[in-house]
Image (cartoon, grey):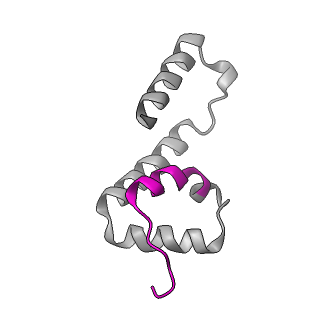
Amino acid sequence: MTGTRDVACRELVELITEYLEGALPRDEVAAIEAHLVDCPGCQAYLAQMRTTIAATGSVEVETLPDDVVDALLRAFRRSRD
């Protein structure tokens, strides 16, 4: 697409939640979608995120045991390193 900026895989990972929530400006959405056309790895990541949201989207944090919340937070922090 002409006029669409390039998005790197790492940037897509950082923006994916906002993308899925519809919280990004149109130019950012266009850049992500242009990247997804040619990146099977990011296509798979997006599919995994959608599957995860579908599977866990209705779980209330308050219903999770403290050790599970702690384990999830540790995993999230490790993934951001």
Q: Is residue 64 above or below residue 16?
A: above
Place of residue 68 in the rendered image (x, y in percent of width and height, measured from the top left): 52, 17
In the foreground, 64 or 24: 24
Q: Establish if 17 lies above or below 52.
A: below
Tally of numbered discs: 0
Q: Residue placed at 50% from the left, 24% from the top?
A: 72
**At 32% across and 65% down in the image, what residue appears?**
39
Instruction: Look at the image and give the residue range highlighted in magenta.
Output: 1-18
Q: What x and y, as percent, mark residue 22?
A: 65, 61
Q: Is residue 9 above or below residue 4?
A: above
User: To which quarter of the image does residue 29 belong?
Assistant: bottom right
Is 73 or 49 nearer to us in this picture? 73
Closer to us: 54 or 1: 1
- Residue at the limit of the structure toward the bottom, as seen here: 2
Q: Is residue 17 magenta?
A: yes
Residue 78 location in percent, x, y? Answer: 42, 29
Taking the image as shown, residue 81 lies to the left or right of residue 30, namely left
48 with respect to 57 (left or right): left
Q: Quadrant of the N terminus?
A: bottom left
Which quarter of the image is occupied by the C terminus?
top left
Q: Is residue 45 magenta?
A: no
Task: Look at 67% across and 28% down and name the residue there.
Answer: 60
Q: Is residue 9 above or below residue 76?
A: below
Give the image quarter of residue 24.
bottom right
Q: Residue at x 51, y 50 (%)?
A: 14
